[in-house]
Amino acid sequence: MFTSILAAYDGSKGAYAALEKAAELAKLTGADMTVLTCYRHHSMLEASLSMVRGASETDRNLDNVMRQVSREAAEEAKTRARELGVDKVTAFIKNGPSARTIVGFAAEHGCDLIVLGSRGLGSSEGYLLGSVSHKVTSLTDMPVLVV
């Protein structure tokens, strides 16, 4: 049925439920499972307005902070998938607009199912322009399970 399942994960409750469903499907079908966490590049203006202030120059760069948070979320999801009994699970982080990044990644890596939550940690722009899950379903012909 499925050989490679992509679980989009951002740490939200919806993404957690989607991760659990993806793990269940991976176990049921024997599919490999990939976790993808996306973060968006922030402009210098956004970074200068950020409340994120660290001790080092690296900590003050919002992209570095977002990359680290994404890395931690991806590792958390990978650990949880293994706890749920998935043997073959890998985790990646990518920078870019979430929906397009998810769809592009799935195509590049030969995934045959995308699983994601119906509502995640998306920006307020999502309320105006539509959710990531809605955009993913409209950008791909691949099967998408929205949990």
Image (tube, rainbow, N blue to C red):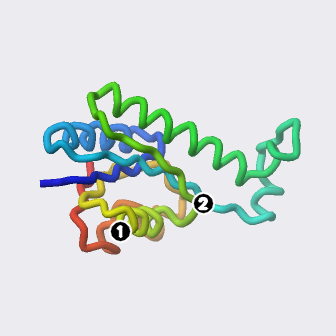
Tell me where residue 49 appears, x and y as whole percent.
80, 55
Left or right: residue 8 compared with residue 144:
right
Label 1 belongs to which residue? Answer: 107
Tag in front: 1 or 2: 1
- Choose top left, top right, bottom left or bottom right for residue 84: top left
Residue 67 showing in the rendered view? yes
Residue 141: quadrant of the picture: bottom left
Residue at (75%, 60%) from the top-left corner? 46
Judging depth in this view, the residue of 36 and 111 nearest the camera is 111
The residue tagged with tag 2: helix, strand or loop? loop
For the image, the number of numbered tags is 2
Relative vertical location of residue 85 with respect to residue 106 in this rendering, above or below: above
Q: Position of residue 118 (x, y in %)?
A: 33, 52
Looking at this view, is 134 or 113 the one in front? 113
The secondary element bearing badge 1 is classed as helix
- Mark 1 or 2, nearer chain start: 2
Residue found 60% across the figure and 60% down from its top: 40
Q: Residue at x 26, y 38 (%)?
A: 23
Under mark 1, the amino acid is Ala
In the image, is 142 to the left or to the right of 100? left
Q: CA distance from mark 1 to mark 2?
A: 20 Å
- At label 2, the amino acid type is Arg
Residue beneath label 2, please? 40
How packed mark 2 is, by other alpha carbons closer than 10 Å (few <14, some 14-19, many 20 or more), is: some
Residue 110 percent across, percent down from the top left: 31, 63
- The N terminus lies in quadrant: bottom left
Q: Residues within 10 Å of mark 1 (few under 14, many from 20)?
A: some
Query: Can residue 131 be seen at all in this image of the molecule?
Result: no
Asked whether 35 or 16 is in front, the reply is 35
Name the spot of residue 134 as percent of width and height, x first: 33, 65
Is residue 76 positioned above or below 1 on the image?
above
